[in-house]
Structures are given as structure tokens and as C-alpha cells.
Image: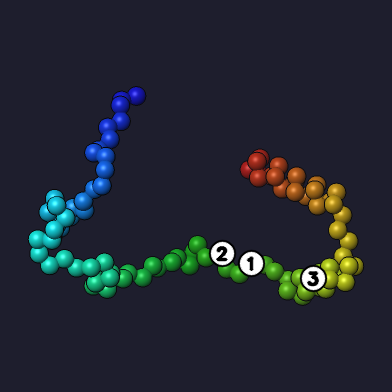
């Protein structure tokens, strides 16, 4: 592997349009806020083909389960939860 060359160490002075090596302006230089206001902002156009739409959620069923959990009537079986998590992990690894 070729050696990596590093630049000079220590504080660096900004260089760019309107600046010389010592960091002194050579002419009128616009501030960051002035530049951002002057530059036109282009709107991002999104494709409708990539829009997944609304997620398929049954709001009534979610409310029913939430109430059952609050009342302590919803059965949570740790073995079923663990099995589902393991199955989901296996499906993600297999790519099916």
C-alpha cells in the first residue's frame, strides 16, 4: 500500500474566491446567510411510483388491543413472542 501524505500541521487559513493566503479579503465577499438567500432553492420532486402509501393498520383492532393491555386482559406469552422474533430474524437472513 502506498504511503499516505499529510498536509502541514497547525491552524489553516481559509482560501477561496475573494481571499488571499493570509486570510484577508481582496474584494467584497458575501456572508453565508447572504449566499444562501441569493441561491435559488430547488424543490425536490418525488415520484408517485415510489410512494408506499398509508400502512395497512386496522385502527379499531389497535384500540381494542390497547384497551385489553390496559385492563390486563391481553395474554402475552413470552415463548410465542420469542419464537416470532427468532423466525423474523431467520427470514431476514435467508432473504425469503
Question: Could you say where residue 8 lies in the image, as x and y percent from the top left?
Answer: 23, 38
Question: Could you say where residue 32 lies in the image, as x and y percent from the top left?
Answer: 26, 66
Q: CA distance from mark 2 to mark 3?
A: 26 Å
Any part of residue 39 in sight: no
Q: Is residue 88 left or right of residue 4?
A: right
Question: Could you say where residue 53 lies in the image, as x and y percent from the top left?
Answer: 57, 68
Residue carrying label 3: 66
Q: Residue at x 21, y 53 (%)?
A: 14
Q: CA distance from mark 3 to mark 1?
A: 19 Å
Residue carrying label 1: 55
Q: Quadrant of the N terminus?
A: top left
Viewer-closest of 32 and 60:
32
Q: Are marks 2 and 1 in contact (CB under 8 Å)?
A: yes
Please name which of the two marks, 2 or 3, marks the residue nearer to the observer: 3
Q: Which secondary structure, mark 2?
A: loop
Residue carrying label 2: 52
To which quarter of the image does residue 43 belong?
bottom left
Q: Residue at x 66, y 40 (%)?
A: 94
Q: Residue at x 67, y 67 (%)?
A: 56
Q: Residue furthest front?
A: 10
Q: Are marks 2 and 3 in contact (CB under 8 Å)?
A: no
Amino acid at each position: 500500500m502506498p504511503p499516505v501524505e499529510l498536509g502541514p500541521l497547525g491552524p489553516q487559513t481559509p482560501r477561496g474566491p475573494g481571499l488571499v493566503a493570509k486570510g484577508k479579503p481582496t474584494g467584497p465577499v458575501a456572508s453565508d446567510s447572504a449566499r444562501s438567500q441569493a441561491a435559488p432553492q430547488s424543490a425536490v420532486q418525488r415520484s408517485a411510483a415510489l410512494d408506499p402509501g398509508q400502512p395497512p393498520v386496522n385502527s379499531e383492532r389497535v384500540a381494542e388491543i390497547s384497551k385489553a393491555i390496559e385492563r390486563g386482559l391481553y395474554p402475552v406469552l413470552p415463548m410465542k413472542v420469542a419464537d416470532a422474533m427468532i423466525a423474523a430474524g431467520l427470514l431476514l437472513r435467508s432473504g425469503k
